[in-house]
């Protein structure tokens, strides 16, 4: 089968791939021939996602339970992934959480959980795979940030800080890894229909939609398409960039 995919023979690690945007990225990568480590906190969730991907693209996906916020976990499971595949070409730091609330009342724990997962989680995963990534001829790191990291959002000081932090991390890494041909980019999704935005009321969604020039929320596939572009050969001269995929909300 195959030989024609954009990501043939490449190994990709996608964190937070049990559902939503991460699962869509894992699936589109598999559809283009990549071997995909489907990473999530719970084995049940990443195994279900991997099974679903394998039902369409046999043998392409494998589940690994890892807590990105825990450097012990990223180090141990990172080694398992490297042993399973022998290399990693593409790392997508997608795992993320929200703990919304006004800064005035935000607990230290809500700050820490969001920063530890969204920002330190990406650092932990880079540490786990950087040696292998730096050895590959055209490795890619793709960090899933957010428009909230660009424009802020009341009630999301922790989340906005983590997502803006990811952009700085992306640019610093892009400079450090450039001499080895590794590109490092971020995607800033707008409002995408997933479990994360499911908590919004119809009224909130309407208010959001009024500020989206293209007049609708995005789908996980919209972000997966951008990730595929950045992962592929066509994006080899792009590094340190933030690709906003938001229906025109931020421009
Ligand atoms: N949905 C949106 O509108 C939107 C907008 C901008 C950015 N994003 C970002 O996109 C990414 C994916 O969001 P989504 O909407 O698919 O969310 P989601 O809640 O549906 O999925 C998040 C995934 O991350 C995993 N995860 C959470 N903490 C983890 C940890 N410590 N270790 C490993 N995995 C962990 C969860 O298990 C889940 O599979 C997140 O980083 C999010 O911040 C989402």
Image (spheres, rainbow, N blue to C red):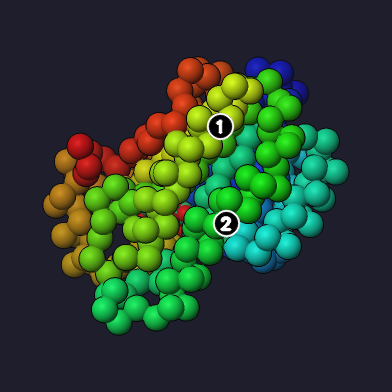
Checking the image for residue 121, the label placed there is 2
Residue sitting at x 37%, y 58%: 161
The quadrant where residue 85 appears:
top right
- Label located before the other in sequence (2 or 1): 2
The quadrant where residue 226 appears:
top left
Left or right of 172 on screen, residue 137:
right
Q: Position of residue 211 (x, y in %)?
A: 15, 50
**Considering only vertical position in the picture, is 153 above or below 11?**
below
Left or right of 112 on screen, residue 106:
left
Asked if residue 220 shows in the view, the reply is: no
Element class at badge 1? helix
Q: Position of residue 37 (x, y in %)?
A: 70, 45
Q: Position of residue 208 (x, y in %)?
A: 20, 56
Q: Is mark 2 within 8 Å of ligand 1?
A: yes
> What residue sits right under mark 1 in the picture?
176
Residue sitting at x 56%, y 36%: 141
* Image depth: mark 2 or mark 1 in front: 1
Left or right of 211 on screen, residue 44:
right
Q: Which quarter shows the C terminus?
A: top left
- The front one of 87 and 54 is 87
Checking the image for residue 187, the label placed there is none
Q: Which quarter shows the N terminus?
A: top right
Left or right of 6 on screen, residue 195:
left
């Amino acid at each position: 089968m195959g030989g024609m995919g954009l990501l043939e023979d490449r190994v990709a690690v996608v964190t937070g791939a049990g559902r939503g945007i991460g699962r869509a990225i894992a699936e589109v990568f598999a559809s283009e021939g990549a071997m995909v480590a489907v990473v999530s906190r719970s084995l049940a969730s990443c195994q279900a996602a991997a099974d679903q991907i394998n039902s369409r693209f046999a043998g392409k996906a494998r589940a690994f339970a890892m807590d990105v916020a825990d450097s012990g976990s990223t180090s141990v499971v990172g080694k398992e992934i490297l042993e399973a595949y022998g290399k990693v070409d593409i790392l997508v730091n997608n795992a993320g959480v929200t703990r919304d609330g006004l800064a005035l009342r935000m607990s230290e724990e809500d700050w820490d959980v969001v920063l530890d997962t969204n920002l330190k989680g990406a650092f932990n995963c880079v540490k786990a795979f950087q040696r292998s990534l730096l050895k590959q001829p055209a490795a890619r790191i793709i960090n899933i940030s957010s428009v909230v990291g660009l424009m802020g959002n009341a009630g999301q000081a922790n989340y906005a800080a983590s997502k803006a932090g990811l952009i700085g991390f992306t640019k610093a890494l892009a400079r450090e890894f450039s001499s080895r041909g590794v590109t490092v980019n971020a995607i800033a999704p707008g409002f995408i229909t997933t479990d994360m935005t499911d908590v919004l009321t119809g009224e909130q969604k309407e208010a959001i939609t009024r500020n989206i020039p293209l007049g609708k929320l995005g789908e996980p596939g919209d972000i997966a398409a951008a990730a595929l572009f950045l992962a592929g050969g066509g994006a080899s001269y792009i590094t340190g960039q933030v690709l906003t995929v938001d229906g025109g909300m931020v421009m």
